[in-house]
Image: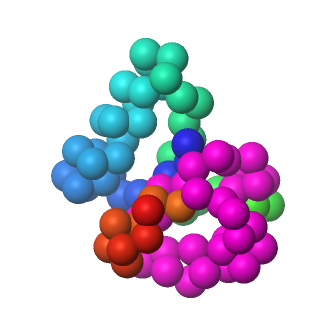
Amino acid sequence: MLSLPVDDGGCGWERVRQNLKEMRLQGLAETLIFDGKESAEELMKAIELADVIIARPNTAELVKGIKEKYPNKKIVDKLNGRF
């Protein structure tokens, strides 16, 4: 599971970081959280390998590009109604 860039604030911590960390600790999934400091190459490689991508606020253009390149990629994007 890959989370697109997430902040360190309460929402990012409570809704994303804690949950993905626990999934990883319990061996339920390999997880990766981007904070926006990674290179474009690192991001594209992670997107290519991810089975599930968690979209975050302000990533609509990135999600659009992902869906164009990988139309069958599973993206969780509650804000825009895509699951």
Q: Quadrant of the N terminus?
A: top right
Q: Who's the residue at 31% across and 35% down the image?
A: 18
Chosen colour scheme: rainbow
Q: Nearer the viewer, residue 83 or 8?
A: 83
Q: Who's the residue at 51% across and 46% down the image?
A: 33
31 w.r.t. 78: above or below: above
Start-end of magenta stretch: 45-74
Q: Who's the residue at 36% across and 74% down the image?
A: 81
Q: Residue 2: x, y in percent?
A: 56, 48
Q: Quadrant of the C terminus?
A: bottom left
Q: Residue 46: x, y in percent?
A: 71, 50
Magenta stretch encompasses residue 42:
no
59 w.r.t. 18: above or below: below
Q: Residue 13: x, y in percent?
A: 28, 46
59 w.r.t. 15: above or below: below
* Residue 42 in sight in this render: no
**Res 76 quadrant in image:** bottom left
**Res 70 quadrant in image:** bottom right
**Res 63 quadrant in image:** bottom right
Magenta stretch encompasses residue 50:
yes
Left or right: where 70 falls relative to 80 = right
